[in-house]
Image: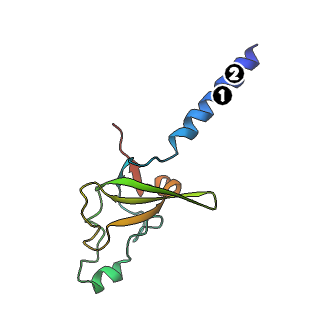
Amino acid sequence: MKKLVLTLSFICICVVTFAQNEPTVGDELIVEAPSGESYNHISFPRLNILVKRGKLASYNPVIGNVIIVEEIVNKDNVTYVIIKKKDDTKFFGLQSSAEANYEKALESGELTIVTP
């Protein structure tokens, strides 16, 4: 009986933790600073492209922005999310949305989930 209770509780815990990692449309996230020079799991333009378009070569304008998950795309068992800014302005004044690898961006700290 003990083993049955422990097994059921373990399964419930696994299901709950797995369910928290799945994104839904409308989730709010915060863009954090990249660990290196550029973002590895969010498709923001590279710094040289920003300079060519007359912007500063810096990711500081997007750090700390609240973004919303607009669409969820599954490609080859990898979850990608299409994100846009909550205030409907463009990233760097250039692009209105971006694509991000959801799991890897959360693991690397490029994105964090807004807790209510």
The residue positioned 25% from the left and 65% from the top of the image is 61
Q: Quadrant of the N terminus?
A: top right
Q: Residue furthest bottom?
A: 52
Task: Establish if 4 lies above or below 35.
Answer: above
Secondary structure under the numbered disc 2 in the rendered image: helix
How many numbered circles does the render carry?
2
| Dot 1 amino acid type | Phe
Numbered tag placed on residue 6 in the rendering: 2
Task: Establish if 29 lies above or below 60.
Answer: above
Numbered tag placed on residue 103 in the rendering: none
Disc 1 designates what residue?
Answer: 10
The residue positioned 29% from the left and 72% from the top of the image is 58
The residue positioned 46% from the left and 46% from the top of the image is 24
Secondary structure under the numbered disc 1 in the rendered image: helix
Q: Quadrant of residue 59?
A: bottom left
Q: Quadrant of residue 44?
A: bottom left
What colouring method underlies this structural image?
rainbow
| Location of residue 21 in the rendering, given as x and y in whole percent from the top left corner | 52, 44
| Location of residue 93 in the rendering, given as x and y in whole percent from the top left corner | 24, 72
Q: Residues within 10 Å of mark 1 (few under 14, many from 20)?
A: few
Q: Residues within 10 Å of mark 2 (few under 14, many from 20)?
A: few
The residue positioned 44% from the left and 64% from the top of the image is 99
| Dot 2 amino acid type | Leu
Q: Is residue 31 left or right of residue 107?
A: left
Q: Quadrant of the C terminus?
A: top left
For the residues labelled 2 and 1, the Cα–Cα distance comes to 6 Å
Task: Establish if 98 lies above or below 56.
Answer: above
Q: Are marks 2 and 1 in contact (CB under 8 Å)?
A: yes
Q: Is residue 79 left or right of residue 67?
A: right
